[in-house]
Image: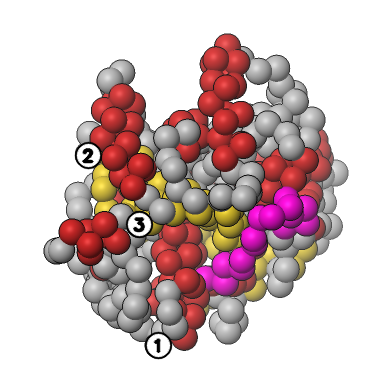
């Protein structure tokens, strides 16, 4: 590669810490490639939608008890086989994609699978063990500094991340792009528009801790850099509804064109599938109440499978499988890809989460129905942020092309002798 080509190869630098962020970087690259939106539909040969060894939705419970099969903690997952699909669009700008690897085994496994897809698209992938010990952050930041200095454009999936905020203080890039990190994108844009400090919605309302205060100057600097200026542009690439747009920030729509061009259409199965959430793990929803709501939803709508969120704990999923009879599935890719390649239920049930916005886009043109059930205020924990209920209601209320379900009463709230399904 010539020096000029090598320099161009690093013109765009992307940082991701989750599989969904990596997916949305691929969507952004596809949407911004010349003719990218018109790329001919294709199918990734390595993960067929029907039949074949890899057509399943992911890792499922190995026993009737429903105990999920975790990935090995040391390496998370071996490098996935080549996921060959259509070549990258003509004129496609090569980007360097940096994975700031977390320690969670399930997230690492999904990231490795997504990294293979990124390589198949012709992008460079750099895997950083960013959290592998006390010295890891120093090694990571030191190794990335030359790339950050040269980059013309920086793409990031999580502007709330302390790692990303620290890296933003180093870069001289004149173009900053924020791609979706789920519903957090809505809060990020709103906070930027109001000039507030960047705080995740489920933590807002609490007192800043010692680490927050120590990191406050870096966070403030990152917020200033994410504010458009005469020598810097900021773009948000999102499938989320955005009501408050900061002055000077360009918002472009993510319609999941890359996902639809590479996978599906899916084979549909009878019955319903249920999408899990990590609201219990983040301390927003009470675990017992959540389990009761899942059981009621599954019983009412005939759900058979439960697609676990990558952050859901093994103990919680084991209990859920045993007490509800649902087959717990640990997806090995983001749910948008799992649903698009199939097989998938004709109805997908979800609580308020990112997927109520993304799945209708990824599944457009299919017969899949996405239905969302609100979170009852009674399910919230005492430690939940004061903004939790309003934020979750907003996630549901702004979703398009979904069916709204009434809040499911927990079984302890149903009068004796009354069946939940019939009311």
Where residue 206 appears, as percent x and y from the top left, is: 71, 21
In this rendering, the answer to whether 35 lies above or below 98 is below
Q: Return the mark for residue 75.
A: 2
Q: Is residue 109 left or right of residue 221?
A: left
Taking the magenta stretch, the answer to whether it contains residue 15 is no
Where residue 239 appears, as percent x and y from the top left, is: 61, 63
| One can see residue 336 in this view | yes
Q: Quadrant of residue 370?
A: bottom right
| CA–CA distance in space, label 2 to label 3 | 30 Å
Q: Nearer the viewer, residue 227 or 117?
A: 227
Q: Return the mark for residue 11.
A: 3
| CA–CA distance in space, label 3 to label 1 | 27 Å
Question: At x 20% / y 53%, what residue is drawn?
Answer: 79
Q: Quadrant of residue 41?
A: bottom left
Q: Quadrant of residue 96?
A: bottom left
Q: Nearer the viewer, residue 34 or 107?
A: 34
């Amino acid at each position: 590669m010539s020096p000029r080509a090598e320099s161009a190869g690093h013109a765009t630098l992307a940082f991701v810490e989750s599989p969904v962020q990596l997916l949305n970087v691929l969507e952004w690259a596809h949407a911004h490639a010349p003719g990218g939106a018109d790329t001919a539909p294709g199918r990734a040969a390595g993960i067929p939608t029907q039949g074949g060894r890899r057509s399943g939705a992911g890792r499922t419970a190995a026993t009737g008890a429903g105990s999920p099969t975790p990935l090995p903690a040391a390496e998370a997952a071996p490098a996935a086989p080549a996921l060959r699909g259509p070549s990258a669009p003509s004129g496609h700008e090569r980007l360097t994609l940096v994975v700031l690897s977390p320690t969670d085994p399930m997230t690492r496994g999904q990231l490795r699978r997504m990294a293979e897809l990124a390589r198949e698209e012709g992008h460079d992938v750099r895997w950083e063990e960013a959290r592998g010990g006390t010295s890891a952050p120093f090694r990571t930041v030191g190794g990335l500094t030359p790339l950050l200095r040269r980059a013309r454009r920086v793409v990031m999936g999580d502007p709330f991340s302390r790692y990303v905020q620290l890296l933003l203080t180093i870069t001289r890039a004149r173009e900053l792009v924020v791609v979706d990190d789920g519903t957090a994108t809505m809060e990020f844009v709103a906070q930027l528009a109001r000039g507030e400090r960047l705080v995740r919605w489920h933590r807002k309302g609490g007192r800043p801790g010692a680490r927050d205060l120590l990191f406050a100057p870096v966070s403030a600097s990152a917020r200033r850099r994410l504010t458009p200026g005469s020598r810097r542009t900021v773009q948000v690439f999102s499938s989320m509804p955005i009501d408050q747009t900061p002055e000077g920030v360009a918002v472009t729509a993510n319609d999941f064109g890359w996902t639809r061009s590479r996978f599906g259409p899916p084979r549909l199965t009878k019955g319903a599938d249920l999408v899990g959430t990590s609201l219990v793990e983040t301390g927003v929803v009470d675990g017992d109440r959540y389990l009761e709501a899942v059981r009621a939803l599954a019983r009412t709508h005939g759900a058979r499978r439960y697609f676990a969120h990558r952050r859901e704990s093994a103990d919680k999923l084991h209990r859920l499988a045993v007490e509800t009879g649902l087959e717990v599935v640990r997806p090995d890719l983001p749910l948008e890809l799992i649903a698009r390649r199939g097989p998938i239920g004709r109805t997908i049930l979800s609580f308020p989460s990112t997927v109520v916005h993304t799945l209708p886009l990824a599944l457009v043109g299919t017969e899949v129905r996405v239905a969302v059930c609100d979170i009852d205020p009674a399910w919230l924990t005492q430690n939940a942020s004061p903004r939790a209920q309003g934020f979750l209601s907003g996630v549901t209320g702004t979703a398009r092309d979904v069916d709204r379900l009434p809040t499911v009463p927990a079984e302890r709230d149903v009068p004796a002798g009354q069946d939940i399904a019939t009311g």
